[in-house]
Image (spheres, grey):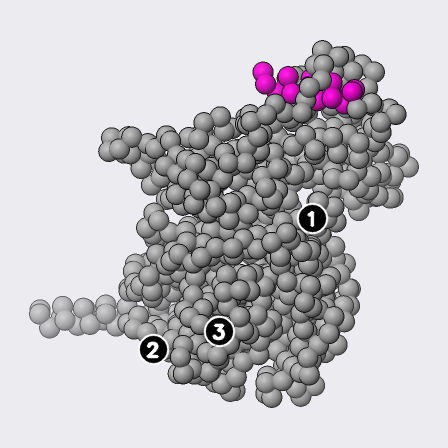
Amino acid sequence: MARASYLVAGFFFALISCCQSSAQVTSERIENTAQEPQNWLTYSGDYSGHRYSELKQINTDNVKNLVARWVYQTGALGKFETTPLVVDGILYGTGQDNRVFALDARTGRPIWQYQYIYPSDIRPCCGRVNRGVAILGDKVFFGTLDAHLIALDAKTGNVVWNVATTDYRDGYSFTLAPLAVKNLIVVGISGGEYGIRGFIDAYDPNTGQRKWRFNTTPGPGEQGHETWAGDSWKIGGAAAWITGVFDKETNQLFWPTGNPAPSNRRVQREGDNLFSNCLLALDVDTGKLNWYFQYTKHDEHDWDSTQVPVMIDLDGKKLIAHANRNGFFYLIDRSKAKLILAKPYAKTTWSVSKDEEGRPLATKDSSPTLEGNMVCPGAAGATNWMSPTFDPQTRLFYVNAREQCDIFSTAPQENEPGHAYYGSAYFPAADAEPYWGALRAIDPLTGEKQWEFKHVTPSWSGVLSTAGGLVFTGDSEGNLIALDAKAGKPLWHFQMGGAVIAAPMTFAVDGKQYVAIGAGSALFSFALP
Amino acid sequence: MKVRTVGFLWLLLVPLIVPAQESNPFANDPKAIAAGESQFRANCAFCHGLGARGGGRGPDLTRAQKRHGKTDAELFRTIDDGIPGTAMPQNGTTGQGVGMTDAEIWQVISYIRSVEKKAAAPHAGDATRGDKLFHGAAGCSTCHMVQGKGGRLGPELTNIVSARSFDALVESVRYPSKRLATGLIENTKEFPQEYETVSVTTADGKQYTGVALNEDNFSVQLMDMQQQIHLLDKTSLKSFRKSRESLMPAYDEKTLSPQDLNDLLAYLFQVSEK
């Protein structure tokens, strides 16, 4: 009798354990996303930052028939920036106020929801936002507005571990989607509007134990320390608030960094201010710096370089394409750590010459003054954090560009921990041209614009490209738009009733391809009828 | 959502523990005024201009009379909560900055009070004559409504005096195209719609000129000169032309003397006080 019940119990547990492993997301799976295009396993779709999908059920011929399939209302206010992940029919996303949700990706019906309760005295910059989760093994990972990193059980949303990475009261927060790579969860800190010391961290996915930290402002004895006046490195900002990419071949992370603090006041931080506004090549296992490229030395215009660096392999060259907030499109040879070209892709007035490496140099009169000084691009940049895409079929790089100039002025202030430390103010010129934007297709090898689709006002949407010959993007008026990737002709659109401040992604369940995007406070999905 | 709930509970609890602060702890404090100016430049100048003198986007805060800031406590609430339906956002939600602490808001209020002009505003005109001009000879009411009377093609003006500086109002009468008036504000959208001039030819050859009530990449909602609304798909139009040349005529000094303009402003000032 007893023996029989053991047998039953054994059979029962065998049943449970047999099925758990099948849904496990491994780093190998994320490295080989092309093998399972029905899933979207990491923020940019794959480790290269392409935000490109091999799915082609929706294509240039039939996209006109696309219809809304479901809408998920987060019920939260503020900017909705998530890029959801999809694993085997389940969609994982984050809401504006640090909630996490798992949905049936066919119907939008929630499976679980988790609401993080953060302290009432957080003051993150630029909205209470979050851009999504990472997934590895049987857990999903997300960063909070009070700088915690949390692991949730992927099937229930139960908390597995929760670690404070630093003290949020000094202005630290997380807004980015973490990157799951090898046996690590990698995150970069937000808070460049405060006198923080930026960092990129890697954590053990099973325990939450920190494996390494790379400080983006070097301390005494560290490389680059001499590029900060006095103790300014201690509060030098250089946050790292967008998800980087991973190059398996060289075992390196490529991670971009943000503005030095205060954002546009020269006097407190003379020097190049390494590693603000850089592309960092870090050894993924140790966090050690292999090399760096600084896009904007001693930035005075809040031009974070926090755009997803896109790894492109073209004509035998291993490249990184980066449309920077400062208005220049950069092409870098990532095998030689060498700049190949830097070319404006939007109106720029701050640089008319280049240094010996080909890097744009700032003119003297582009520095902000107390009275104010007009510079293009404006403080929001020629682009911002919105994801670009690279389409290997057209070999084009697509980015939402913004045409806006601002008057940059200084607002002198001393740093006080936990208090905003801008040192700056910016506003439109009285006779400013109306702001506008455009989705631009750029040939990455030349930096030349191939086509553009003009937006009525600048768009904060990311861009997705697919093997169906399409690029998808959103606009600030609430449209999701599908365009012909070759010529830029709009083929379909849908009005979602709220501005898009997120990036589109695509997945498939039961053989049906979906496109999903956040707009207003809701996540929308679309498919063919 | 959670934050709002917590905030609501907190409001319930606070009066039981300590009286809500109604007066500025930093009033007239020179240090607070200096700190407040720095905060103002970073958080407020974008719309209210350097020196708080207003601009095309926000009111002149150097005017002693404020629609939403008669007392310091009221000004605090205006800054912290914003004004629904206007471009004045809730503290910390502009998407630009981090928002201000309570102490920083009080500092900004100290600064604003320090730059207020106590002297009478430059509206020493004849409001009765301005009323007649507005609704008669000057033709303003053809397109603008005040207190429910007038046209629809231009912005409603009942409270415009409290929403814009005198300089901005004078500019918009003399040079209406220099900075177009703002129209519809949508919650999640970065910029309000402006009073742009739109001319279209429809597929069946009809031509309309008017102002854009709203526009996106694919559609436009147009009010024509006869104040008829046309809902149009851009792709179905034979022509679509948008211009930043305002439909409002520029009133130079020959058309509208400085005295006439003063009288009009006096009238608008009077109605905004009601």
Q: Which residue is mark 2?
A: A211
Q: Which residues are magenta?
A: B259-274
Q: Which residue is mark 3?
A: A228
Q: Main secondary structure of the magenta part?
A: helix
Q: Are marks 3 and 1 on the same chain?
A: yes
Q: Nearer the viewer, residue A527 or A197?
A: A197
Residue A450: tell me if it is visible.
Answer: yes
Q: Which residue is mark 1?
A: A429
Q: Earlier in the sequence, mark 3 or mark 2?
A: 2
Foreground mark, 3 or 2, reads: 3
Identify the subunit bearing mark 3.
A
Horizontal and vertical percent position of residue B69:
50, 29
In the image, residue A170 sits, relative to residue A476, either above or below, namely below
Identify the subunit bearing mark 1.
A
Q: Residue at x 77, y 58 (%)?
A: A489
Q: Nearer the viewer, residue A371 or A178?
A: A371
Q: Spatial distance from mark 3 to mark 1, Cα to Cα? A: 32 Å
Q: Spatial distance from mark 1 to mark 2, Cα to Cα? A: 48 Å
Q: Spatial distance from mark 3 to mark 2, Cα to Cα? A: 27 Å
Q: Residues within 10 Å of mark 3 (few under 14, many from 20)?
A: many
Residue B262 lies in the magenta stretch: yes
Q: Amino acid at mark 1?
A: Ala
In the image, residue A170 sits, relative to residue A254, either above or below, namely above
Q: Residues within 10 Å of mark 2 (few under 14, many from 20)?
A: some
